[in-house]
Image (cartoon, rainbow, N blue to C red):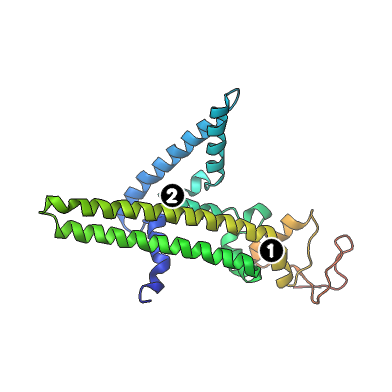
Amino acid sequence: MLLQPFQVRAVRVLEGYWDRWSVTAGFAGVLMELQRRRGQVLADRADAATDAGPDARRVAADASRRLAAAPPKDALLPTALGNALRAGELSAGERYGLTTLASWPRIYPQVSAPLAQALSSARDMLDMAVNLCHAFLACAVVMGAAFYDEAGDWWLVALALVMAAVAYKGAVIGAQAYAGLMHVVYDLHRFDLVEALHHPLPDRDGEWALFQRLSDRFAGQRVNLPYMHGSSRPNETDGPAQSEKV
């Protein structure tokens, strides 16, 4: 309970937000370069499927899937956990013209109960794995200090580090599941967000433009959008029967 207010910080540390201090910022730069090279290797594997056998095509398909789940090269973070979460933060709403980070607090209240439960479960799994990772790392440090002159007990330190690595892998899996569910939220509930804001529902051609204008409004810009009050939905071709400009 006492550590609950620091949960966000605990996750962000493992995500790789280390630019506050020069030493960790330098280390982050090294890890980001490794992430870029890893992405290039995956891209090469994905491109190698042309005129290849079944095994090579399977490897290429796996590489393509992993590339699709990664953030853009200019938005990479030093760690796998950070990139798993950032992939959702930068693409879930952007596919429809919405800025995810700005629109998420507004669309989340519109989420259906089953989807909200799935999001909560994925987030709980992520937080629990992060906490376990920190706990095992702390145990490794304490045992390393306690057994520094007892070589026969160093296996305990190694065991704690292995358990921390397993917990970290679990956190990455939880982050990938959470990011995937973020995409589902925008697939199913983006129009519920429009209705909650009392704007007319767009047709297919106007969807992108509307969501971009909403993103501008969420960013603090003044945007003129029609209001639509009432329970009836506007006709997509005729437009709202009654609207007012703001």
Q: Which of the image's four quarters has the C terminus?
A: bottom right
x and y, in percent, of residue 238 in the image: 89, 63
In this rendering, does residue 17 appear at all? Answer: no
Q: Would you place residue 105 above or below residue 159 in this image?
A: below
Q: How many marks?
A: 2
User: Can you say whether 3 is above or below 95 in the image?
Assistant: below
Badge 1 crowding class, 10 Å Cα cut-off, few under 14, some 14 to 19, many 20 or more, is some
Reading the image, the residue beneath label 1 is: 189
The earlier-in-sequence mark between 1 and 2 is 2
The residue sitting at 84% across, 67% down in the picture is 234
Indicate left or right for 32 with 64 as reference: left
Task: Compute the Cα span from label 1 to label 2.
Answer: 28 Å
Which residue is at 33% across, 61% downward?
134
Q: Is residue 66 left or right of residue 77?
A: right
Kind of residue indicated by mark 1: His
Furthest toward the left, the residue is: 149
Residue ID for mark 2: 80
Q: Position of residue 189 (x, y in %)?
A: 69, 63
Q: Is residue 237 left or right of residue 56?
A: right
The percent coordinates of residue 105 (x first, y second) are 58, 69
**Mark 2: few/some/many CA within 10 Å (<14, 14-19, 20+):** many
Residue type highlighted by circle 2: Ala
